[in-house]
Amino acid sequence: MTPINMSSDTQTLPTERMYDAMRSAPLGDDMLRADPTVNRLEEIAAEKVGKEAALFVPSGTMGNLVALMVHAKPGDEVLLDAESHIYYYEAGSVASVAGLMPRVVGSRRGRLDPDQVAAAVRKRDQHFPVPRVLCLENTHNRSGGCIVPVELQNRLAAVAHERGLAVHLDGARIFDAAVATGLPAAAFTEHVDSVMFCLSKGLSCPAGSVIAGTAAFIEQARLVRKRLGGAMRQAGILAACGVVALETMIERLAEDHTRARRLAEQISTIPGLSVDLESVQTNMVYVDHTGTGLDTDEVLTRLATAGVLASDRAPTHIRLVANRHHGDAEITEAVERIRRAVSD
Ligand SMILES: Cc1ncc(COP(=O)(O)O)c(C=O)c1O
């Protein structure tokens, strides 16, 4: 039995066009800015998110870190949603590498409250770290891929800017937000100072993310990336996939969203499992398994034995993510396997 791997959109493999592009990409030394394919990717990427310039980085985690290290220096404060990927899943790099002081603010479905953010920005006073940057995340991973409406994002950015803070958007899945709302990605990035997005998730590249901002910001980001060991040589072999991703893989994300929705609706009919259907806005499905009486590890083990790989949102949920390897048949089969796994 072939497992259906729904643990993440990071499980996607390169497309045939990506393999072809890797083979034929003109290459050079990107450390010297001499890799034409990386340069092309960075140009296309900047244009997609409406920024002056962009920089290719090995991972989303490094992209976020580089951006924060350009916006703030050790001892400064960064305002973060307590459920954000940067705070929750990036191994404390904000503190251990960037030396920043995190100040966390609560969110609901990935939505920060502008009044709470305003209240969290303390005045400049020798007792407090200097607040320098507000981080936003869209779509929001830990809330199940929810979209933060562009109007709210703009209000949050305005609150930060009025108080002298920069705004960084962790837009790992910003094209999911764009496709789901029918807005251009640039609508979500217009009022942020920097954005990071991932090529290696639903867009199916084997590796790589991009950060974008003003030309001056990217100049500094290049130095920080080098410091962190993230500057590569013939990186065009990876960037070639990124070019294919940006040219051919964005619109099809809508298919993942449709299939995630179907998956969610059908799982909701399985006794013991429930899904908050309002939270299924893009490619993720968070399944509440408390009705089964099983703990999260047991549910994951049973699913894996039945041939569905999911990820852990303990203690009450598992996460399933639809990606391009799941057609309608895989969704139907996954639902049946899950049904069997929890009813045994
Ligand atoms: C919202 C968000 N930001 C950042 C990242 C980090 O990306 P990477 O795994 O490439 O470091 C992820 C990865 O899942 C993510 O979901």
Image (tube, grey):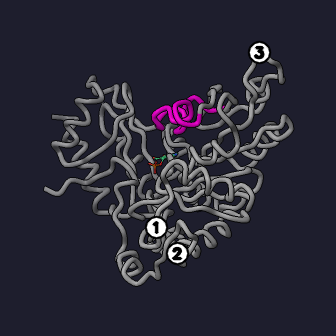
Q: Residue furthest left?
A: 1
> Taking 334 as reference, is 131 above or below it?
above
Residue plotted at (83% across, 37% down): 164
CA separation, marks 1 and 3?
Answer: 44 Å
For label 3, being within 8 Å of ligand 1 is answered no
Instruction: Identify the magenta region.
Output: 79-98
Q: Find out whether residue 89 is within the magenta segment.
A: yes
Asked where in the image residue 124 lies, by quadrant, the reply is: top right
Which label belongs to residue 127? 3
Q: Secondary structure at mark 1?
A: loop
> Which quadrant of the figure contains the N terminus?
bottom left
Residue at the spot of label 2: 35
* Mark nearer the N terminus (1 vs 3): 3
CA separation, marks 3 and 2?
Answer: 47 Å
- Residue 267 shown left or right of residue 139 in the figure: left
> Taking 16 as reference, is 107 above or below it?
above
